[in-house]
Amino acid sequence: MYWILKWVLLGPVIRWFARPVVIGTLPNGPFVLAPNHLAEIDSLVLCAALPRRLTFVAKSEYFAKGGAGAWLYGTLCRLTGQIPIKREGAGSADVALEAANGILARGGVWAIYPEGTRSPDGRLWRGRTGVMRVALPGAHEVLPVGVVGTRSVNQPGSRGWRRGRVEIRLGEPLDLTRWSAAAANDPVAWREATDELMASIQRLTGQEYVDRHPSAEERARRDAA
């Protein structure tokens, strides 16, 4: 179903609106795709524009039938094999991260927004360490990606999409060799490597960086817009 959506049902519409331009090349084999997150349409644009099949984690609310928009997005998640993830509570994301390990073990591409949520204001926010909790122990490649232009296509507070131009800027895979195998399960190493990832994304996008996570109030204002 993923490829039917990509090439027949949904992808042509996404590509018409976003007119995506991909700068750079994807690695071969398994790797983690780590983009910034500006707009609700980001995942659709990335899936429509990049040649590899991407499996994202998606917040578990999208898998519940709670409103037309959430139901539609949840249906797309189910049809394309996306992974639900709970964002609250200690250890709540462990099952999803274990599933991500399975994707990489099968030679696939696991895509995750290291910010953990959509940017409230277009800036780049501090990354969460889930990426490195998977990448460091498994010695997986992590590819920083800068997405630019999706907020003009999917404008905050507006209904529908507008035609625009989106750039998907593929960086070089991170050099994670400075963190030894002994440090692969060390939260300090996860944090350091995540900060390195966010710096790489910031260089690709030119966004202003905010060294903290968005507050509940900031996320609420974003969702109410």
Image (spheres, rainbow, N blue to C red):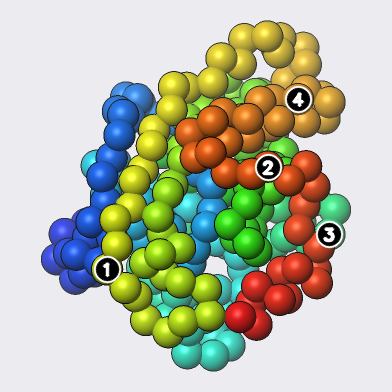
Residue 89 badge: 3
Q: Position of residue 98 (x, y in %)?
A: 62, 43
Q: CA distance from mark 2 to mark 4?
A: 16 Å
Q: CA distance from mark 2 to mark 1?
A: 27 Å
* Crowd tier of the residue under label 3, counting other residues whose Cα lies within 10 Å: few below 14, some 14–19, many 20 or above: few
Q: Position of residue 184 (x, y in %)?
A: 73, 20
Q: Which residue is mark 2?
A: 209
Task: Identify the secondary structure beneath mark 4.
Answer: helix
**What amino acid type should be assigned to the residue bearing mark 1?**
Arg
Q: Is residue 89 left or right of residue 198?
A: right
Q: Which residue is mark 4?
A: 192
In the rendered image, the quadrant that contains the C terminus is bottom right
Residue 163 badge: 1
Q: In the image as oriented, which residue stretches furthest toward the left? A: 8
Mark positioned earlier in the residue sequence (2 or 3): 3
Mark positioned earlier in the residue sequence (4 or 1): 1
In the image, what residue occupies the spot 80% across and 47% down? 212
Task: Identify the secondary structure beneath mark 1.
Answer: loop
Q: Is residue 73 left or right of residue 101?
A: left
Which numbered disc, 2 or 3, marks the residue closer to the eye?
Answer: 2
In the image, what residue occupies the spot 16% across and 59% down? 7
Task: Identify the secondary structure beneath mark 2.
Answer: strand
